[in-house]
Amino acid sequence: MSSFIKKITLLLLFTLSLQAQSGLSQKHLVSLSPENSAEDVSADTSVEIEYDLAISKHSLHKKTVTLKNSKGKKIRGKISVKNKNTLVFTPNEELESGEYRVKVKHVNLQDYKSHTRFKKYTKKFCSYFYDDVKKCRVYKYAARVKSKNIKYSFSVDANRPKVISLSLNKSNLQLNENNTTTISVNAKYDNNETVDITNEVEWKISNPNIISIDKNIITPRSEGTTTLQAKFNNQTTKEISVTVYKEINGYRLPPEPDKKLNDSTLLGIDVNSNGVRDDVERWIFKEYKEPIVQAVALQNARAFGKILVDPSRARETVKFTEATTDCEGYYEYQDSRHLIPKRKSLHEESRPLILNTRERSHAYYEFNQALSGGIYPGRPWDALKYSCDFNETKVQRGEW
């Protein structure tokens, strides 16, 4: 009995020794795909080596991953990194049936979580020069961990079903910056089977500053628009656009316009076509916190647009600025629950921003000149509320 136990122990030690030599038992290695000694692997497979730390792309080269068939023929392909921590080798062509051997040379991993004295000092040093110390080469060097070489094999069955197309379950997305959403990828095989492969794909984001994606969860990072696409082996999905927007008090703000383009015309950029220049609209919602004040300020900005577009019609369009003044007067003197204390009227406070170019200031000057000599009676005191062009109840509920 003791002889049998010794044999089992020796066999176990021998197996562990082989694992250590092949690099399959190293510390930061999470998984292999295909797995070691896997059989009946699909011909359209790619090789994926997942680590628990981010991979430094600067440590990769064309010989980082080598794939050979049983005859020693080297398989050509492309090397990439998926989800920051997965090394991917994608063959240029489908594999034939037979055994394949994989060799992976060491790569540099970035370990920012564990702490050493050297890492602590370099982090402090880099913080004087970088807002994000991970961009500092000295700190990157201090956080570097070198993986071990890996050797393993798998077998391919070229008769297994192959992926013929990929599809996303969502088209173009509009995403509030405070929300997340999920997305999935389906693969259609040549045997008409459809399989969810979301956790196996590589995500391609044209602007990673806008969104990030972890498995199937899309998380906004900043306002803007980017494209999103999934890749699996040699197949890719169609690109979709993802727009991240800001919302305040239930009101969706337009994106920040390009200043040069916005100031190149009299009325500027108004992507949501609500009569308010986009930079002015964003300023209103950042400057004023009370929804009713925001609504009055929007009405004021719309009035400016109407009077600037054709100053010669001032005696007709002045009614819009008068309505704004009357609406603001109602909330200031008859229903003061909503207006915040301020030194000037909303008209005066917003004027420097609205009239921020020579063309706009000149149009406003011509508007005032055209009004010269006229008499413009306002609404009766008890009718001021009807000068407002918005529904107070809906605004309060965030139903703009």
Image (cartoon, grey):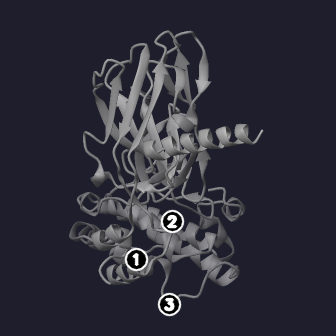
- Residue occupied by mark 1: 119
Residue occupying the far right of the picture: 1
Disc 2 residue type? Answer: Leu
Q: CA distance from mark 3 to mark 1?
A: 53 Å
Where is residue 229? Give x, y as percent.
43, 36
Callout 2 crowding tier (Cα within 10 Å): few <14, some 14–19, many ≥20: many
> Secondary structure under badge 2?
helix
Where is residue 120? Give x, y as percent.
42, 81
Q: Are marks 1 and 2 in contact (CB under 8 Å)?
A: no
Disc 3 residue type? Answer: Arg
Q: CA distance from mark 1 to mark 2?
A: 52 Å
Q: Which mark is residue 395?
A: none
| Residue lying at 36% horizontally and 37% vertically, measured from the top left | 103
* The N terminus lies in quadrant: top right
Front in this rendered view, residue 23 or 160: 23
| Residue lying at 48% horizontally and 59% vertically, measured from the top left | 221
Q: Is residue 241 visible?
A: no
Q: Which mark is residue 298?
A: 2
